[in-house]
Image (spheres, rainbow, N blue to C red):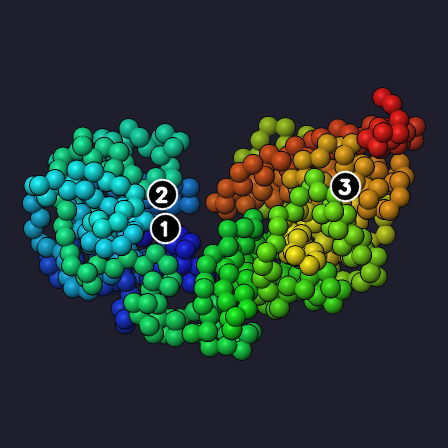
């Protein structure tokens, strides 16, 4: 099994799958293949998914078969087994990232079994309770002073048939997708044919869940591993590889991959560009905007950005609290930051026009034969009409963030930072406010109108209200299309897709009547006055 993304091994897993790491002078999966072949097992299949092409060489180098698992990003390893249901008979089931200090495989196995090592202390791994005859009677998730399931499993023909009956029955249930095959085994252990526990003494079977585990096993790993990412960090921060410690992935961001680490007592975040971002992000423009934001003290986290390759290093700000759209201090502080940007007089050689960028992404999707939903073209036409009206208003371009919303505002203990400048360029000030409203604010249209007064420091005019609401519809539609593109790349966007779709619809519905006649501008004023308690319905 070699399909997983090994996200806990970031940032090295951004460059290659964990099974291809060199440990103590050998590639992990190559070592296992050789051990299997040494005992006469030659019918070997490698199921791949994440960065699958990196494994293709094994077919010619070792005579193995390659099977591609297309579900690796949306299912756990039960999806891997589903790709080889025709091959599970008398079969070793191995993980590509295990390391066996000696060859534990045997040419002949007569009963199903799972390898295990005794854990003296607390463990979060699957643990087995065993009957007197050595057969696994119960599986628990975690334990203490228990036999920890670690390494291979062996399915004999009888077990394979019974287990596949369960897998085929459970596979299409929504709750099965995130499960390991061991979860299914644990749930049906008393109904399945017996599986023995194959006990091994400590120091034989190794599983590396985290980078720290591997570094503890192979102390020269960080020094020897072929990694441009580590080289980037060392060159930028003037440190040695062994100075990079406390590495862990950051589970945030919709576009890129990030990892938190420490060097000389200071915490940093390394941002690795996500797949497909080169088609929708201008990294030269981003690097320019980051330097500008640092100069304006809008973003003191910036350390360095490589414009050609798209990676970035930022200083980590500890003790931040989540931005709250319902917290007046948060909202006022964020709007003050973006207003300062707009009034800075800074310029950029690049522009970001949401209407043009939408057309660009739509073309990318059409080139992929993406199946647009019903009503898409009609909504796109409405947004194009609003974009044309905005163009006629000829708002003077200013320096914009263009992705200004709650998660990109760090609320630190001392101050706020406006981060993530991937789309920073010249643009329409209203689109920054449109981002703020469209991207998860939860505001009704009338609430957004009221927030405009905080941005301007006065009551927004009817023309300003109309302009910013139209920008919100245009921006919401851009991110809706952007989310489709990310999903076409295999990155599920969850509820964001719906949020952006809803913003495009709701704000278009609200603003379109305001363009029908000048008299309709009074509707914008009424919205503001009602929300602020100054008027009546």
Residue where numbered disc 3 is placed = 471
**What element does badge 1 sit on?**
loop
- 3 or 2: tag closer to the N-terminus: 2
Instruction: Give the distance between the C-alpha atoms of the residues marked 3 and 2, in whole angstroms.
Output: 40 Å
Label 3 vs label 2, nearer the camera: 2
The answer to which quarter of the image holds residue 212 is bottom left
Q: Is residue 237 left or right of residue 13?
A: right
> Measured along the vertical axis of the image, is residue 229 above or below residue 530?
below
**What element does badge 3 sit on?**
helix
Q: Residue at x 26, y 41 (%)?
A: 140
x and y, in percent, of residue 483 in the image:
58, 42
| Residue in the foreground of this view, choosing between 43 and 428 | 428
Q: Is residue 200 left or right of residue 451?
A: left
- 2 or 1: tag closer to the N-terminus: 1
x and y, in percent, of residue 10 in the image:
44, 59
The image's mark for residue 4 is: 1
The image's mark for residue 76 is: 2
């Amino acid at each position: 099994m070699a399909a997983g993304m090994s996200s806990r091994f970031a940032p090295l897993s951004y460059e290659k799958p964990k099974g291809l790491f060199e440990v103590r002078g050998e590639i992990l999966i190559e070592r296992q293949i050789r051990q299997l072949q040494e005992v006469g097992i030659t019918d070997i299949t490698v199921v791949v998914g994440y960065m699958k092409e990196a494994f293709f060489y094994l077919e010619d180098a070792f005579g193995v078969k390659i099977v591609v698992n297309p579900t690796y990003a949306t299912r756990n390893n039960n999806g891997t087994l589903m790709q080889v249901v025709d091959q599970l008979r008398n079969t070793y089931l191995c993980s590509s990232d295990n390391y066996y200090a000696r060859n534990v495989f045997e040419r002949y196995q007569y009963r199903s079994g799972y390898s295990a090592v005794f854990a003296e202390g607390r463990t979060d791994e699957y643990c087995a309770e065993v009957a007197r005859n050595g057969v696994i009677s119960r599986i628990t998730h975690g334990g203490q002073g228990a036999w920890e399931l670690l390494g291979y499993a062996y399915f004999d023909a009888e077990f394979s048939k019974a287990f596949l009956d369960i897998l085929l029955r459970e596979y299409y249930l929504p709750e099965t997708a995130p499960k390991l095959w061991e979860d299914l085994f644990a749930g049906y252990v008393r109904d399945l044919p017996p599986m023995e526990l194959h006990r091994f003494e400590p120091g034989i079977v190794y599983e590396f869940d985290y980078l720290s585990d591997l570094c503890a096993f192979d102390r020269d790993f960080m020094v020897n591993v072929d990694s441009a990412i580590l080289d980037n960090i060392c060159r930028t921060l003037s440190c040695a590889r062994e100075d990079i410690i406390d590495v862990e992935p950051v589970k945030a961001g919709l576009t890129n991959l990030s990892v938190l680490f420490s060097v000389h007592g200071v915490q940093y975040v390394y941002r690795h560009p996500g797949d497909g971002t080169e088609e929708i992000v201008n990294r030269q423009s981003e690097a320019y905007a980051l330097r500008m934001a640092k100069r304006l003290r809008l973003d003191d986290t910036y350390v360095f950005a490589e414009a050609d390759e798209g990676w970035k290093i930022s200083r980590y700000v500890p003790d931040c609290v989540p931005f709250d759209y319902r917290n007046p201090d948060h909202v006022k502080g964020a709007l003050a930051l973006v207003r300062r940007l707009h009034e800075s007089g800074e310029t950029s050689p690049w522009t970001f026009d949401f209407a043009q960028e939408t057309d660009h992404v739509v073309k990318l999707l059409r080139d992929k034969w993406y199946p647009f939903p019903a009503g898409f073209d009609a909504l796109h036409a409405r947004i194009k009409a609003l974009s044309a009206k905005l163009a006629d208003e000829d708002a003077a371009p200013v320096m914009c963030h263009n992705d200004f919303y709650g998660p990109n505002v760090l609320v630190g203990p001392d101050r706020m930072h406006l981060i993530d400048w991937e789309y920073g360029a010249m643009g329409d000030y209203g689109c920054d406010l449109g981002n703020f409203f469209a991207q998860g604010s939860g505001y009704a249209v009338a609430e957004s109108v009221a927030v405009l007064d905080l941005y301007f420091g006065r009551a927004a005019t009817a023309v300003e209200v109309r302009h910013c609401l139209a920008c919100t519809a245009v921006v919401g539609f851009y991110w809706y299309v952007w989310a489709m593109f990310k999903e076409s790349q295999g990155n599920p966007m969850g509820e964001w897709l719906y949020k952006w779709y809803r913003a495009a619809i709701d704000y278009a519905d609200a603003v379109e009547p305001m363009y029908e006649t000048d008299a309709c501008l009074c509707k914008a004023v009424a919205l503001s006055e009602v929300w602020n308690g100054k008027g009546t319905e």
